[in-house]
Amino acid sequence: PFTKSTLNFPVLSSTGGTDTAFSLLNTGKSDANLSLRGYDQQGNPINPVTAPIKAGQVYSGAASQILTFPGPRDPGWARGSIDTTSVLGLAFLGDSKRLEAFPSPPPAGSALILPDVELNANWSTEVHLVNLTGQSRVATLSLRSADGSDGGTYSVRLDPYATLVNPIDALFPATASPFNGYLLITADGDVSAAELLVGTQAEAGINASALTAGGAGASKLYSAQFVSGPLDYTRLNLVNPTNRSAKLVLRGFANDGTPLGAPGITLDPGKQY
């Protein structure tokens, strides 16, 4: 019933000890109204919850408690419809050992990229691809290894509001472990996607990025966190999906703003760093 803004959450799971929790912050000075609806993997709607979010306050709740699932709790996705433009959203996915967060809204469109696909002894990659529209969509997934070589393609027709949820080795059975690379997604309409890197003791969630035609001009990318220590670290994944070489300068900064160096690299067409 609310159409001012929409927050899409491409990962929704509430089964087998795993649950999704939503946290939505109203940054405005006026109250907001939220309608949060889930969709199962086939695109069937899950009864929505409607709730007010007072100015400056947070609405939060777990999917298992606020959404009424009419049948089996298959993985799917959720959409928040809001009557203002001042609400930001975050979805948490986790169990008793692992927790990961997906900010909303993720990019949506007909060309997306998942920049980090892994399959090895420690990690596997689960792909979530959502049809955001009320019409069937055809999507093609193209796997690339870190050196840019072709890892195969997978095409799927998604019913309205349906979700594709599969591990990477089910989509591309010929993929041998260990594998590192990325996934290109093209579709004939708006889709959204996310990936879940699944380990035995941890999870890492990444929303897809919009895939745009690279221009000849310079651009900047920012990471709000940089950690290097014995227990925690930051890993940088960069992909050049264009047909031109890209020159990059990486600049790190300490907490007090002190520069940590500026190494330069060249990333050849199709390659991952």
Image: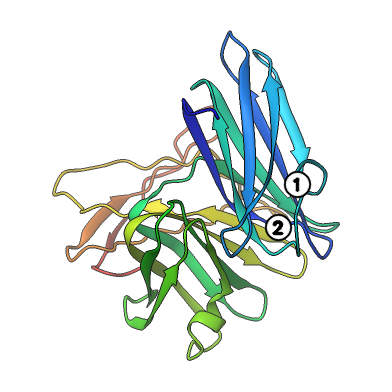
Front-lying residue, 174 or 164? 164
Q: Residue furthest top?
A: 29
Q: Are marks 2 and 1 in contact (CB under 8 Å)?
A: yes
Asked if 158 appears above or below 191 in the picture, the reply is: below
Q: Is residue 28 left or right of residue 158?
A: right
Front-lying residue, 246 or 88? 88
Q: Amino acid at mark 2?
A: Ser
Is residue 43 visible from the viewing direction of this image?
A: yes
Front-lying residue, 100 or 57? 57
Identify the secondary structure beneath mark 1. helix
- Ranked by sequence position, the earlier of labels 2 and 1 is 2
Front-lying residue, 6 or 147? 6
What residue appears at the point 67 percent right and 75 percent down from the top-left corner?
A: 122
Image quadrant where one finds the C terminus = bottom left
What residue appears at the point 16 percent right and 44 percent down from the top-left corner?
A: 217
User: Residue at label 1?
Assistant: 63
Residue 50 sits in which quadrant?
top right
| Crowding at mark 1 (Cα within 10 Å: few <14, some 14-19, many 20+) | some
Q: Amino acid at mark 1?
A: Ala
Q: Is residue 85 left or right of residue 227?
A: left
C-alpha span from label 2 to label 1: 8 Å
Give coordinates of residue 205: x percent, y percent.
Answer: 60, 55
User: Residue at label 2?
Assistant: 13
Give coordinates of residue 227: x percent, y percent.
Answer: 60, 46
Give coordinates of residue 135: x percent, y percent.
Answer: 40, 57
What residue appears at the point 53 percent right and 22 percent down from the top-left corner?
A: 83
Image quadrant where one finds the N terminus = top right
